[in-house]
Image: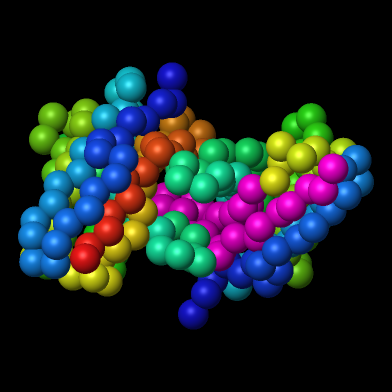
């Protein structure tokens, strides 16, 4: 099963607040990814985990962003001191045994 | 610089006709290509993929063609149905390291009944 759930689906926050998103793959997958999608753009890679190890981070991931995958299952993405430019859809994906990545429904963040 | 380009932001097609969505890439290291379909407020859904060692892959109404020398791929949908109306993203995998996907900006397909 390649299902992925994400919570919350929508988050509205005021600038300067911290937010945390969660990604839960339905079954175990070694590789887990976070992407960000803004209006009119395709998803952009943020970071990647193999099991619990965070192995790669994009330059898009400023030091206000932190991601964890403590037991190699679910993952969290935290944004500290949110800015209006952080408003986007945050997508989690898992990679099955082939090249395909399967995405969750995303968390829509709006920073006011 | 954009490594995966979808130059048509939108496309309208009559129901029953063929839809052709195009994608160009610049990075020669890409060796696997994928198409995703996305509805508003949902995550991308995997549609079909192709390895760089092939030039065609078919799955039902969907066929992807790869022209490696031209660094061009296309997705054909035949026959097009109103339920195919969505944004289609082309993505490429470098086949190494993190296997992260690089996406184009998408093409919005509208299938008119």
Q: Which of A46 and A7 is in front in this view?
A: A7
B107 drawn magenta: yes
> Which residue lies at the image location 63% right of the left edge and 52% below the top edge?
B88
Q: Quadrant of residue A22?
A: top left
* Residue drawn 8% across the image and 66% down it: A16
The magenta segment is B86-113
**How is the structure coloured here?**
rainbow
Across and down, in percent, residue A109 comes to: 28, 54
Judging depth in this view, the residue of A58 and B107 nearest the camera is: B107
- Where A17 falls versus B7 (above or below)? above
Q: Quadrant of residue A50?
A: top left
Q: Nearer the viewer, residue B25 or A3?
A: A3
Q: Is residue A51 left or right of residue B92?
A: left
**In the image, residue A79 lies at what x, y percent?**
14, 57
Looking at the image, residue A99 lies above or below residue B99: above
Q: Residue furthest bottom?
A: B1
- How many numbered marks, from 0 up? 0
Which residue occupies 19% across, 48% down?
Answer: A77
Relative height, residue A69 to residue A20 (above, below): above
Q: Is residue A48 left or right of residue B33?
A: left
Residue A15: in magenta span:
no
Q: In the image, residue B5 lies at what x, y percent?
A: 61, 69
By secondary structure, the bulk of the magenta-drawn segment is best described as: strand
Residue B57 can be seen, yes or no:
no
Query: Which quarter shows the C terminus of chain B?
Result: top right
Left or right, B92 with reference to A46: right
Residue at 34% x, 59% y is A88
Q: Is residue A94 visible?
A: yes
Q: Taking A86 as reference, is B69 left or right? A: right
């Amino acid at each position: 099963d390649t299902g992925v759930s994400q919570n919350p689906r929508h988050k509205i926050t005021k600038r300067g607040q911290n937010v945390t998103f969660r990604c839960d793959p339905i079954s175990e997958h070694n590789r887990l990814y976070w992407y960000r999608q803004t209006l009119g753009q395709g998803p952009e890679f943020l970071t990647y985990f193999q099991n619990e190890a965070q192995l790669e981070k994009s330059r898009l991931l400023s030091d206000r962003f932190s991601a964890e995958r403590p037991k190699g299952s679910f993952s969290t993405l935290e944004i500290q001191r949110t800015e209006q430019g952080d408003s986007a859809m945050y997508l989690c994906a898992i990679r099955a045994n082939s090249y395909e990545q399967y995405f969750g429904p995303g968390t829509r963040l709006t920073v006011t | 610089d954009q490594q995966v380009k979808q130059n048509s932001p939108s496309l309208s097609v009559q129901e029953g006709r063929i839809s052709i969505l195009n994608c160009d890439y610049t990075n020669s290291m890409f060796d696997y290509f994928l198409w995703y379909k996305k509805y508003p407020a949902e995550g991308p859904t995997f549609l079909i993929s192709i390895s760089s060692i092939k030039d065609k892959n078919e799955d039902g109404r969907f066929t992807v063609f790869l022209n490696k020398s031209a660094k061009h791929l296309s997705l054909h949908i035949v026959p097009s149905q109103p339920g195919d109306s969505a944004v289609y993203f082309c993505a490429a995998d470098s086949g190494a390291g993190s296997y992260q996907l690089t996406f184009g900006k998408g093409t919005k397909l509208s299938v008119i009944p």
